[in-house]
C-alpha cells in the first residue's frame, strides 16, 4: 500500500540521473510545488541503486536524511552501545525513514540494507530546515497521519508547533496506546525534542499545575483524558501511532 503518489518504479539500470530525480520529486510533491522549492530540493537529492543484500547508505549519511524507497524492499538495523541489534522490516513498497531520530534516546548507529534490488531517493536535509520546503513538509505530515510507520519523529521535529504541544505529543507518543505512564526524565525529553532542560522543566511545571500530567522521579503520567480520548484533538492522533518502546526507555534510566 502506497501512501504517496509515485510514477512507475525505475529499474536498477536507469542511467540518466538528474531527469529521473526531478520526475520523482515532481510526482512526490504534486502539481502545487513551486519551481524554487523543486530546484532547491534537487540540490539535496541523489538516487541510490542497490543490489540485494547490499547496504543502501554509509553510516555518515544516516544523519539528517530522509530515504524514499522507490522500488524494492529494505530492512533497517539499529544497535545501541550494548551491541544489541534489532531488525526493522519495512512492510510497504514506499517508506520514509528519518535517520536522525530512528531509535529515540538510545545511543545508536543505524544501517539500511536492501532485501531485494532497490532504487531509493535520499534527501539530505536537516529537519529543522524542513519549514523552508512547505510542500515536502506537508507530504511528510500527510504520510505520517495516514501510516502506522515510525514517522511521528518527523512530526515532532518540524519545530513549527509551540513547545507545550510538542511536549504533550512526545509524552503521548511514548506512552503508546495501552498506557498513560511514560518512563523518561526531563533530560530525556529535552534531548528528544532538541531543546534545553530548563525549557522542558518550565513546561512540565505548567502541565502539572494545570492538572494535565503528574510527574515523579523518572516518570510522567497523563491524567487529562481530553488529551487521550478526544478524536478531534490534534494531540490524540499521536496515540494511535506506535513510536517508542517503553522498555527501551526503562533500560536507559
Image: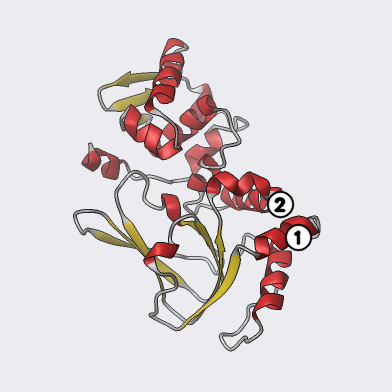
Q: Residue at x 42, y 25 (%)?
A: 200
| Picture layout, residue 131 above or below residue 30 | above
Q: Which residue is painted at 73% across and 65% down in the image?
A: 26
Q: Is residue 129 left or right of residue 101?
A: right
- Asked whether the viewer can see residue 5, the reply is no
x and y, in percent, of residue 64 in the image: 49, 54
Q: Nearer the viewer, mark 2 or mark 1?
A: 2
Distance, label 2 to label 1, CA atoms, is 8 Å
Q: Answer above or below: position of 55 versus 208.
A: below
Q: Which residue is mark 2?
A: 135
On the picture, is 62 further left or further right than 161? left
Residue found farthest to the top: 209
Q: Which residue is mark 1?
A: 30
Whether pointer 2 and pointer 1 mark residues with C-beta atoms closer than 8 Å, the reply is yes
Please tell me in which quadrant of the rendered image residue 230 appears: top right
Bin the neighbour count of mark 2 within 10 Å (Cα to Cα): few under 14, some 14-19, many 20 and up.
many
Residue 235 position in % (x across, y down)? 55, 32
Amino acid at each position: 500500500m502506497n501512501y504517496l503518489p509515485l510514477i512507475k518504479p525505475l529499474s536498477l539500470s536507469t542511467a540518466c540521473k538528474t531527469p529521473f530525480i526531478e520526475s520523482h520529486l515532481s510526482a512526490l510533491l504534486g502539481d502545487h510545488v513551486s519551481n524554487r522549492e523543486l530546484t532547491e530540493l534537487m540540490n539535496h537529492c541523489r538516487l541510490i541503486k542497490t543490489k540485494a543484500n547490499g547496504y543502501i547508505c554509509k553510516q555518515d549519511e544516516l544523519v539528517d536524511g530522509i530515504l524514499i524507497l522507490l522500488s524494492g524492499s529494505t530492512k533497517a538495523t539499529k544497535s545501541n552501545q550494548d551491541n544489541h541489534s534489532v531488525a526493522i522490516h519495512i512492510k510497504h513498497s514506499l517508506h520514509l525513514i528519518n535517520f536522525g531520530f530512528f531509535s529515540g534516546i538510545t545511543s545508536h548507529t543505524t544501517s539500511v540494507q536492501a532485501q531485494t534490488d532497490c532504487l531509493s531517493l535520499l534527501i539530505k536535509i536537516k529537519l529543522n530546515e524542513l519549514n523552508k520546503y512547505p510542500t515536502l513538509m506537508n507530504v511528510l505530515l500527510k504520510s505520517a497521519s495516514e501510516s502506522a510507520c515510525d514517522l511521528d519523529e518527523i512530526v515532532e521535529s518540524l519545530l513549527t508547533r509551540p513547545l507545550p504541544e510538542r511536549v504533550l505529543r512526545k509524552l503521548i507518543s511514548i506512552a503508546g496506546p495501552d498506557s498513560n505512564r511514560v518512563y523518561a526524565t526531563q533530560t530525556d525529553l529535552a534531548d528528544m525534542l532538541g531543546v534545553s532542560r530548563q525549557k522542558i522543566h518550565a513546561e512540565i511545571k505548567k502541565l502539572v499545575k494545570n492538572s494535565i500530567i503528574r510527574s515523579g522521579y523518572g516518570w510522567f503520567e497523563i491524567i487529562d483524558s481530553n488529551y487521550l480520548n478526544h478524536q478531534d484533538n490534534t494531540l490524540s492522533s499521536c496515540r494511535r501511532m506506535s513510536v517508542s518502546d517503553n522498555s527501551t526507555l526503562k533500560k536507559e534510566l
